[in-house]
Amino acid sequence: MSTALPVTSTSGASRPSLAVKVSRDSRTGPIAANTVLAGTTLSLFGISWDIQWHVDVGPDTFFTLSHLMLYSGSAVAGIASLAMVLIATAAQRAGRPVDQFPGGKPVRVLGGVFRALLGYLITGTGAALFLLFGLLDLWWHSLYGFDAVLDSPPHIGLFLSISFTMVGSVIVFAAARHTRWGRAGVIVSVPVLIVFSPITTKAFGALPLPVDPDLVGNVLFSTLLLILGTLTIGRRITALTIAAVLGALQLVLWWFSPWAARVYADATGLPLRDNLGDDPPELPSEIPVFMLFAAAAITALLWLTRQRGWSGRIAPQIMGAGGGAVLGLSLPVQSALLGGSGPDSAELLRMTAVGLVTGVLAGYLAARLAVLLREHSTASVTKGR
């Protein structure tokens, strides 16, 4: 498998073949993909609401509206994925090509009893794991009652399973990148994953690490996904568009999270914490505010590598180094602007260096993942020729 920069042109996506045009006319693909995306977005709003509830109100039980929103999102994505598995299986048994529905490479499940497209298999698996960890969380609540922490073992399992579902959503849309709805889906599903992915790094918060795992996770996932989206779609302004969508999502969550926590507290007769100040919303304030600057650095470096004719094998690492350094420098500044302690010059230099190194790793991984996504998106093209 080639690991060179998987973008041959930044002016537009390659011309789709007849097989891709057929899938463009089908309503099944976009309806299922957008249903999965709606489910993952619902889960994102649910977790943001739940985190804010813990900050503004306090411990909660298993059965709360924020948990219901979180679980409903996973259920919606899981049901849509199951439907696509059954549709693909029925198509195979009827002698029709399974890859007429975009969603990734067809995969044999249970020895060939079922046939599933890779993206929907991952989203469905994530939803199933979410159900299992949800039962574990219910048992955890039955043992300890109120839940006061975010990084309990059931919660980490829930976060990982939702992340799998979100990853599957990106794969589904990337498989349809030759269509307008596929490209739009990548541009929206990637920011959803950017917001959610760093939450899993809270599992490492208790370890005596030299750097904050939340900051490293934020730099790693944000840079990786920005470059991944750019290389998958193959258009120059993709990173900037993703960053703009992320900013819009951050603004909505900034309003929604505290509003939902306060309205629900009033409805249930629970008081807010006495020591609440003017602190920004918990989850939205952790989303990189200066993502557009990182996206601009990635876009400029992509253009520079093309102009200078640099090897596609090192270009993603160069892009990652630039984007990661910008994020590493900006996150401590963002923390200070939002009420945290102001970083000194040594801290800024250290975080910039951490961001640069982390960004190089992010670029390296993004290039390889983009190759896989583009291969899956052209599977039906190859077979249709």
Image (spheres, rainbow, N blue to C red):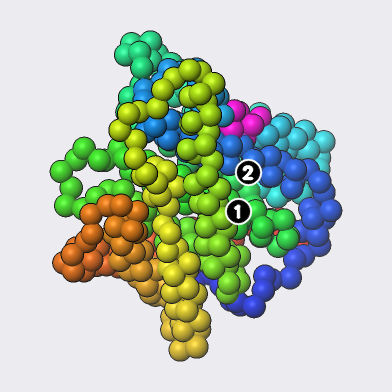
Q: Main secondary structure of the magenta part?
A: helix
Q: Residues within 10 Å of mark 2 (few under 14, many from 20)?
A: many
* Amino acid identity at mark 2: Leu
Residue 248 percent across, percent down from the top left: 56, 55
**Which residue is denoted by mark 1 in the rendering?**
188
Say what amino acid the circle numbered 1 marks: Val
- Residue 205 part of the magenta-drawn span: no
Between discs 2 and 1, the one toward the N terminus: 2
Answer left or right for 237 relative to 220.
Answer: right
- Left or right, 28 with respect to 45, comes to right
Looking at the image, residue 22 lies above or below residue 75: below
Please say whether residue 359 is visible from this viewpoint: no
Instruction: Please say if the residues under marks 2 and 1 sit with CB atoms less than 8 Å apart.
Output: yes
Disc 2 marks which residue?
A: 37
Q: Residue sitting at 34 percent across and 40 percent down?
A: 277
Residue sitting at x 42%, y 43% = 281
Residue farthest to the top?
Answer: 142
| Relative to 204, residue 141 above or below | above
